Image (cartoon, rainbow, N blue to C red):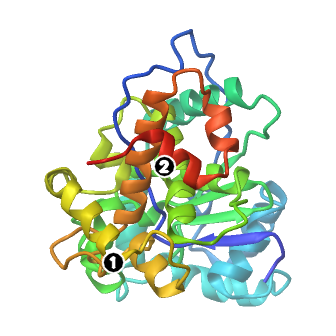
Amino acid sequence: MRKNIFILLIGIILLAGCSGRRYFDGKVTPAAIEIERFDSALLSLPADSATLRETIGQLFTDYPVFMPVFAEDIIGIYADDTSALCSMLPLFLSDTIYGFAQTNQREQELFADISPLQNTLNMAFGRIALLYPEWYMPKVTLFVSGFNASLLWINDDIAVGADMYLGSDYAYYNHVVYDYQKQTMRPECIAGDVISAYLFKQIPFTSENNRLLDNMLYRGKIMFLLQQLLPDEKPWEVMGYTQEKWKWCERNEAAIWRLMMDKQDLYKTDHLVITSYLNDGPFTSEISQDSPARLGTWIGWRIAEQYMQRNETVSLQELMAESDAQKILEQSGYRP
């Protein structure tokens, strides 16, 4: 494995809500996020073995950082083993048993026009630049992963496995993921996943405590910020919920909080309790099998939102820098 690569599979945690405050009333200058089309370059490889070696060499020239990563971490072949790549890549591109050929074709059709993705990323990162002008703006590379990864961190840049975003109803996903994961496997989810991953990297968990409350507020704060960066998105869409799941949370918010209080879960440090509330899955096991997953993050967002509504002089940067979860909880006045 090459260093500085972090593979994020499908369970990227996303959340958003509706706040009464507006943080970007002024004109936002869009960023100029570079999107590389490694997917199109790879999928245009010739079937003719006589020119395949030369074309693969061109991929290494055009994508000197990403092509070795793709060869070793996605295909599973040493980057300098050109003969093996010449043998394996055509199979990767043309296989119909596992659906790679069909998937690659659908990926090229869905992402023939990436201007909506480009515009969303440019606007979101333009807002980020207003808050944190010193932050590095990442390059984004689209690729096909053979159902191996949705996002790759490559140093400070992000690669997106676009074949993991072909639509919740895509038939071949039935063989590679659970049903609850399909909601976020749509083209519209790419921008949110990219920005969410970026925020989690830029704003690390710094609390001296590792209680459920600290983890909830850490994630909730980031997702509150994500909501501000994607103001046109429906909250359930950015959360990765269906609208029905979102409404379930709203209907049962008081009951969820009461159960958490009764069980005294907020101040627990038990890893299993924390992951139950925060990790993706079919439901939040500490609450109910009827519930959506990630309720800890959802409640954390609600607390962060109410805190900002009650503390109008606090900026987004100050919210993100505040590591005292107990302070945020108390000053939010959160009592659903």
- Residue picked out by circle 1: 263
Relative to 332, 97 lies left or right: left
Q: Amino acid at mark 2?
A: Leu
Res. 43 in view: no
Count of numbered badges drawn on the protein: 2
Q: What's the CA distance linking mark 2 and mark 1?
A: 18 Å
Mark 2 or 1, nearer chain start:
1
Q: Amino acid at mark 1?
A: Lys
- Residue 91 spot, x, y in % from top left: 53, 85
Q: Which quadrant is home to the N terminus?
A: bottom right
Residue that sits furthest to the top in the current view: 26
On residue 329, the disc is 2
Q: Quadrant of residue 333?
A: top left
- Residue drawn at 45 percent across, 40 percent down: 332
Q: Is residue 322 visible?
A: yes
Q: Quadrant of residue 186?
A: bottom left
Q: Nearer the viewer, residue 141 or 251?
A: 251
Instruction: Please identify the quarter of the rendering in which residue 201 is found.
Output: bottom right
Q: At 33% from the left edge and 68% from the top edge, which residue is drawn?
A: 261
For mark 1, does the 10 Å Cα neighbourhood hold few (<14), some (14 to 19), or many (20 or more) residues? few
